[in-house]
Image: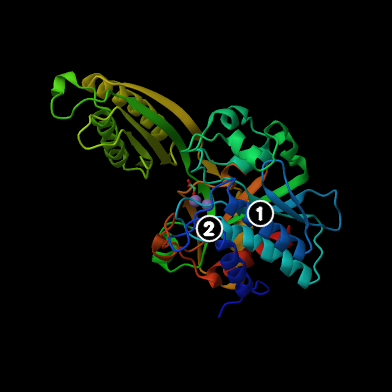
């Protein structure tokens, strides 16, 4: 058995299982959307666990949970590590959560081993990384980066018409004070995010650890096609205005376009909402998400251009109108080569099989990378499954990735 000393895989399991109880869909995967009762319970649980580990713990102005293990020299730029505590609808108990609990476990180990780091070690659990409630990711990490989010907070709404602003206020948070969450990035040496891979590479190649050197870029649009409700039997094809006829042409184009590029680009219309959604009524409205992800900026640009052209042409053919709103535009990023090298060194000395790889999933780390040296470390996902209830990663594999992160943190 390869050593992941001093990381304790049982403790990681216990905490992840405890966190998984804060879930609005028990028995059907984990659902913990931002600013819900389950998310509040998860925050309180995390704060209690952080305090029990001896961390100076607080919740910031945008709902991130932060714990600090003081170092010898509190003026030195800190090492930070974490991931997110929200989930998708009916997701797993590992996505994001494994990174939060691993960072906590590293803090616990440091204390137990009597190791006082030179610099502070900051553990962070981000709010709303997934972006599935308000169709926009990275609320918490944008908060500490100080990105301008006021428009999104005011205008972006969930399926029930509740805005981010209203959701924040339901948590007694003041949306006008989010600038209090911004970090001074001169005081941060590095950010590390441990995450499950969420894809098949490590599992299929039988590898134990992934060292992430780049993260995919993506764009997300919300499209609303406006048609007219009419009788489906009596309205001739040339006199109807069918929102789904329009949308389905565009959606079919998206997949075909991504396949035709043959460069790893993927396109997804994961959210679709039809009104009035009745068999014998011509659809009056069809709202759908159009998301593209790619390592190549040119492919993202080509998708955007093609999407708009297809929308214009299909709307003209079907006599409909449309609106398109850009929700996200995240460039592809390269992570810190220096930190990748250090992780590789740790994997070598511990005997963990590993490879350098790319992330096709989005992560808080890709935005944090604009502010400080950043790296990610992956643990294998069984059968590559994620964003579904079948998501699974062995706790010992999380412990191995955490051990490599532990070496990195103690080496800084
Ligand atoms: C988050 O998991 C994302 O990649 O959208
Ligand atoms: Mn995640
Ligand atoms: Mn996710």
Q: Position of residue 188 (x, y in %)?
A: 74, 46
Q: Which residue is under mark 1?
A: 43
Q: Which of the image's four quarters has the N terminus?
A: bottom right
User: Marks 1 and 2, how far apart in space?
Assistant: 13 Å
Residue 187 in view of the camera? yes
**What kind of element bears circle 2?**
loop
Picture quadrant where residue 200 is located: bottom left
Q: Name the spot of residue 46 as percent of width and height, x first.
A: 67, 58
Relative to 266, residue 51 above or below? below
Q: Quadrant of residue 182?
A: top right
Label annotation for residue 194: none
Task: Respond yes or no on whether mark 1 lies under 8 Å from ligand 2.
Answer: no
Residue 108 against residue 246 in the figure, above or below: below
* Residue at disc 2, CB closer than 8 Å to ligand 3: no
- Where residue 143 sits in the image (x, y, percent)? 66, 39
Mark 2 burial class by Cα count in 10 Å: few <14, some 14-19, many 20+: many
Image quarter hosting the C terminus: bottom right
Residue 351 screen position, x and y as percent: 56, 73
Who's the residue at 26% across and 34% down the image? 248
Between 52 and 357, the one nearer to me in the picture: 52
Neighbor class of circle 1 (other Cα within 10 Å; few <14, some 14-19, many 20+) is many
Left-right relation of 319 to 347: left
**358 or 271, which is in the foreground?**
271
**304 left or right of 228 in image:** right
Q: Which mark is residue 23?
A: 2
Q: Is residue 231 left or right of residue 306?
A: left
Q: Is residue 352 visible?
A: no
Judge whether 2 appears above or below 184 on screen: below
């Amino acid at each position: 058995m390869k050593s992941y000393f001093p990381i304790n895989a049982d403790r990681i399991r216990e905490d992840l299982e405890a966190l998984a109880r804060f879930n609005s869909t028990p028995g059907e995967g984990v659902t913990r959307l931002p600013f819900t009762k389950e998310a509040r319970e998860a925050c309180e649980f995390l704060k209690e666990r952080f305090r029990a580990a001896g961390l100076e713990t607080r919740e910031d102005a945008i709902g991130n949970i932060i714990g600090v293990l003081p170092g010898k020299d509190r003026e030195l730029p800190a090492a930070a590590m974490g991931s997110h505590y929200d989930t998708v609808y009916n997701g797993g108990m590992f996505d994001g959560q494994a990174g939060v609990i691993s960072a906590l476990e590293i803090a616990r180990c440091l204390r137990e081993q009597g190791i006082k780091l030179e610099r502070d070690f900051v553990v962070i659990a981000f709010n709303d990384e997934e972006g599935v409630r308000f169709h926009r990711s990275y609320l918490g990490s944008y908060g500490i980066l100080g990105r301008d989010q006021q428009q999104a907070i005011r205008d972006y709404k969930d399926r029930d018409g509740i805005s981010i602003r209203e959701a924040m206020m339901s948590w007694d948070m003041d949306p006008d004070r989010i600038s209090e969450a911004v970090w001074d990035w001169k005081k941060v040496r590095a950010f590390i995010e441990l995450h499950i891979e969420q894809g098949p590479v490590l599992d299929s190649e039988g590898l134990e650890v992934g060292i992430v050197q780049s993260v995919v870029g993506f764009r997300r649009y919300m499209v609303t096609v406006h048609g007219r409700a009419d009788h489906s039997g009596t309205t001739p094809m040339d006199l109807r205005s069918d929102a789904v006829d329009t949308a389905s042409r565009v959606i079919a184009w998206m997949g075909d376009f991504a396949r035709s590029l043959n460069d790893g680009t993927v396109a997804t219309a994961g959210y679709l909402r039809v009104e009035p959604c009745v068999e014998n009524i011509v659809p009056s409205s069809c709202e759908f998400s159009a998301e593209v992800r790619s390592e190549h900026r040119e492919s993202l640009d080509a998708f955007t251009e093609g999407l708009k052209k297809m929308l214009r042409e299909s709307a003209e053919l079907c006599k409909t109108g449309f609106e398109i709103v850009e929700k996200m535009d995240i460039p592809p990023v390269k992570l810190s080569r220096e930190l990748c090298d250090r992780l590789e060194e740790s994997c070598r000395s511990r005997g963990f099989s590993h490879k350098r790889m790319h992330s096709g999933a989005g992560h808080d780390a890709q935005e944090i990378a604009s502010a400080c040296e950043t790296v990610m470390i992956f643990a294998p996902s069984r059968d590559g499954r994620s964003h579904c209830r079948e998501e699974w990663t062995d706790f010992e594999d999380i412990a191995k990735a955490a051990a490599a992160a532990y070496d990195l943190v103690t080496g800084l």
